[in-house]
Amino acid sequence: MAKDRKNVTNAMRILHAAKIDFETVEYETDEIGEHFGETIAELTGLPAVKSFKTLVLRGDKNGIIVVCVPVSDEVDLKKAAKVSGNKKVEMIHVKELLGLTGYIRGGVSPVGMKKKYPTYMHESAMSFDTIAISGGRCGTTLMLAPKDVQKATDCQFTDIIKED
């Protein structure tokens, strides 16, 4: 767990307060390009199927929702709309991220957002003892059990990725 207070993110503070165990994995952010989820998985040495990216969507009926999918997969907007009770959902614009979540692009964690939004994680997470999620800033990944992500976010595990 992170010991240096200046390097502790809101996500880490919430996990500490809930007495949820996690490990931090740090990486350099200088060489991250457009597909940073997969690049981060490579930099940290974590398999892409165990590394989950956090996306923020807006539904036409129920407002903001959060989805977490493996970094090598793409969210299926129709499936996300259906599980969230919307007719359709769309990605929010990147300039809205900080105001809605408290996080910047590349550092959005499902844990510790400004508001507790309905959160949906792809069901594949349940097949692993630990998964990787953003630590709440670029350069930090958190490793923890999927059930602990659920404890911190009240997420639902469901099928929300596009099939090949």
Image (spheres, rainbow, N blue to C red):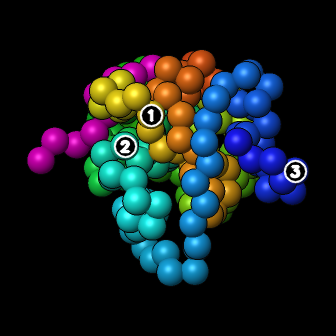
Q: Determine whether the residue tagged by mark 1 lies in a helix, strand or loop.
A: loop
Q: CA–CA distance between discs 3 and 2?
A: 27 Å
- Dots 2, 1 in contact, CB < 8 A: yes
In the picture as drawn, the residue positioned furthest to the right comes out as 5
Instruction: Find the magenta span and give its range.
Output: 155-164
Q: Position of residue 111 (x, y in %)?
A: 65, 35
Identify residue for label 3: 5
Q: Label for residue 50? A: 2
Query: What amino acid does circle 1 point to?
Result: Thr
Badge 1: how crowded within 10 Å, few (<14), some, or many (20+)? many
Where, by quadrant of the figure, is residue 121 drawn? Answer: top left
In the picture as drawn, the residue positioned furthest to the bottom comes out as 31
Q: Answer yes or no: is residue 105 visible.
A: no
Q: Residue at x 41, y 47 (%)?
A: 51
Q: Position of residue 124 (x, y in %)?
A: 30, 31
Badge 3: how crowded within 10 Å, few (<14), some, or many (20+)? few
Query: What amino acid does circle 3 point to?
Result: Arg
Identify the image quadrant of the N terminus: top right
Query: What amino acid does circle 2 point to?
Result: Lys
Q: Residue at x 33, y 51 (%)?
A: 47
Q: Position of residue 14 (x, y in %)?
A: 76, 31
- Pick the residue in front: 101 or 1: 1
Identify residue for label 1: 130
Q: Residue at x 53, y 41 (%)?
A: 143
Q: Position of residue 107 (x, y in %)?
A: 62, 56
Where, by quadrant of the figure, is residue 161 drawn? Answer: top left
Q: Answer yes or no: is residue 140 visible.
A: yes
- Dots 1, 3 in contact, CB < 8 A: no
Q: Which one is earlier in the sequence, the residue at label 3 or at label 2?
A: 3
Q: Determine whether the residue tagged by mark 3 lies in a helix, strand or loop.
A: helix
**Does residue 56 appear to the left or right of 164 in the view shown?**
right
